[in-house]
Amino acid sequence: MDPDKQAARGLADLEAYLYREAHLGAARRRVAAFTSRADGLTREQCGDIERWYLDEQRYVARMVTQHIADSISTAEEHHRVRFGRWLRGTLTAMTLITVAMALCAVVAVGIVA
């Protein structure tokens, strides 16, 4: 793989990791604040709630990421199809223009000769 592509991929992976850790850090703070306000919970119950909430946040983050990736893939496919149609239309138009110009040149040469 090209070193530039490897570097770009590494930066993207690092960015994703930092985003994920920031998201989980915020989730930890939210759940810690929640469990600290809940009276009557044992440490074990607080730990269970915190684990459940963090697992739920990971699941939601994966689902959002998958949805975004699917949306991007769909948009890219739509763009590829539209660009292909545009390119075929342009190629057809250029071919017709070239043929018309060639016919005009033949007619012009025939008139001059």
Image (cartoon, rainbow, N blue to C red):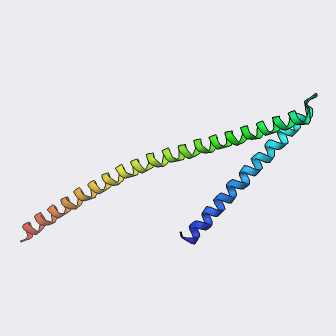
The residue lying at 64 percent from left, 63 percent from top is 10
Q: Please say if 57 is above or below 39.
A: below
Q: Tell me where residue 14 appears, x and y as whole percent.
A: 69, 59
Q: Nearer the viewer, residue 68 or 35?
A: 35
Q: Tell me where residue 84 appears, x and y as whole percent.
A: 37, 52
The residue lying at 50 percent from left, 47 percent from top is 73
Q: Tell me where residue 53 appears, x and y as whole percent.
A: 77, 37
Residue most extreme to the front: 44
Horizontal side of residue 48 vs 83, given as left or right: right
Q: Please say if 52 is above or below 11.
A: above
Horizontal side of residue 47 vs 84, given as left or right: right
Q: Quadrant of residue 57?
A: top right
Q: Tell me where residue 97 appears, x and y as whole percent.
A: 24, 58
Horizontal side of residue 86 vs 64, given as left or right: left
The residue lying at 70 percent from left, 42 percent from top is 58
Residue most extreme to the left: 113
Q: Quadrant of residue 33?
A: top right
Q: Please say if 58 is above or below 34.
A: below
Residue most extreme to the top: 40
